[in-house]
Image (cartoon, rainbow, N blue to C red):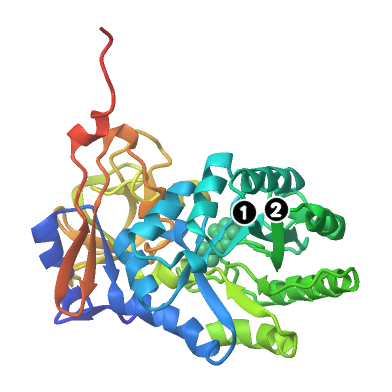
Amino acid sequence: MSAFSLKNGQLHAESVPLAEIAARFGTPCYIYSRAALEDSLDEFLHELAGIDSLVCYAMKANSNLAVLSVFARRGAGFDIVSGGELKRALAAGADPKKIVFSGVGKTAAEMSLALSTGILCFNVESAPELERLNDVAASLGRRAPISLRVNPNVDAKTHPYISTGLKENKFGVAYEDALAIYRHAASLPHLEIIGIDCHIGSQLLDPAPFDEALDKLLLLIDQLAANGIALHHIDLGGGLGIRYQDEEAPSVKSYLQPLLHKLKQRGLKILLEPGRRLVGNAGVLLTRVEYLKQGEAKNFAIVDAAMNDLARPALYDAWHDIVPVAPRQSAVSHWDVVGPICESGDFLGRQRALAIAAGDLLAILSAGAYGMAMSSNYNSRPRAAEVMVDGSQIHLVRRRESVEELYSSESLLP
Ligand SMILES: *Cc1c(COP(=O)(O)O)cnc(C)c1O
């Protein structure tokens, strides 16, 4: 994580001291590094150089407009899962011809919006969705470009909440049914079959399941060809993991090389949908210690960020490293770092060895993915500010929400 490093005893984002951001914009505050975002996308682009390919950033991981625009300017496309994400992507300058639309519950209104926008592809997740899309396209006098999301039934060996490629998951069509559903799709006049896709899970640290999934898709592609259905692209989804604690995250190269090798000579355009890998380690959540509370059984560091700002610890028992912004030389104690929310699940880290005092700033690392994007207003807490650092420049890319905004769309009874 070179974008966030200690210089003269102070944690910086690129060349900006985090303490300066806290002083200007307050805490809690998400901070992203533009260089880190660009570097992570470039890792993919480098491996794909000279290959007919498209990286579609899975924007649900972090949908701040400034983050999206960093990727759009570098030529990335987007993987969206709602009409809201489509509008966001377009507001950030996305090219509609580089947008793929995933998700199991696309409404007719969302399909219609995406069709009139002229997106690249609908990643269809069920047989009934095909029928609806065909109807919507007919009503607009268009043909909808489609791919079927096939569930290859491989075990991604990740947290059950973020594993998506097993039979019991709600995503995609069963591998065994895919050929029949493709044949049916080919008979629907307002659909145009252009691809196949899969997404087997998130935070994968072993590249083997990707390889297994690709083998299954390639078999299916051969069967499709034998049935007169030729595809233009293959979309291998996202899911590549990052280092949160001491995991060995595979390099993009070691993940992609075996896949690219198998895809050589196939004549298929290659689409990828990385989310977490592009943004996770490009962001931190900055928070301030409000109180140190020494309990009988435990010590609590009560900070001003909470599970509404960063849900991953409460939701998945996920680990995020927590480091002081200005490390002290004093003795270390063990602290449960918790927020002010009235839930025992409101923790950001447990039993962390830290030398801290009330008023200190802490950085919660690897918070760029599924952080702000999953935040809520629970306990009527306004959402955090977001800042993008670019070299020595500081850009406020989302101002802190006000309390009044939280209830501005509510009304009293007459
Ligand atoms: C969430 C999601 C992704 C991105 O997953 P990451 O683990 O963040 O890379 C890609 N494709 C689809 C369909 C998704 O739902």
At a point 70% along the width and 53% down the height, the residue shown is 190
Residue occupied by mark 2: 190
Q: Amino acid at mark 1?
A: Arg
Instruction: Between residue 333 and residue 195, name the one nearer to us.
Output: 195
Tell me if 35 is positioned left or right of 236 in this view: left
- Residue 57 appears in the rendering: no
In the image, which disc is placed on residue 142?
A: 1
Quadrant into which the C terminus falls: top left
- The answer to whether residue 210 is above or below residue 260 is above
Tell me if 385 is positioned left or right of 379 in this view: left
- Residue 359 appears in the rendering: yes
Quadrant into which the N terminus falls: bottom left
Give coordinates of residue 273: x percent, y percent.
55, 68
Give coordinates of residue 249: x percent, y percent.
53, 77
Label 2 – label 1 distance at C-alpha: 6 Å
Q: Amino acid at mark 2?
A: His
At a point 41% along the width and 38% down the height, the residue shown is 344
Give coordinates of residue 263: x percent, y percent.
72, 84
In the image, which disc is placed on residue 194?
A: none
Within 10 Å of disc 2 (Cα), the crowding (few <14, some 14-19, many 20+) is many
Tell me if 29 is positioned left or right of 53 in this view: left
Answer with mark 2 or mark 1, whichever residue precedes in sequence: 1
Q: Quadrant of residue 410?
A: top left
Looking at the rendering, the quadrant in which ligand 1 lies is bottom right
Q: In the current view of this chain or complex, which residue is farthest to the bottom?
A: 50
Asked whether the beta carbons under mark 2 and mark 1 sit within 8 Å of each other, the answer is yes
Instruction: Between residue 16 and residue 149, name the one nearer to us.
Output: 149
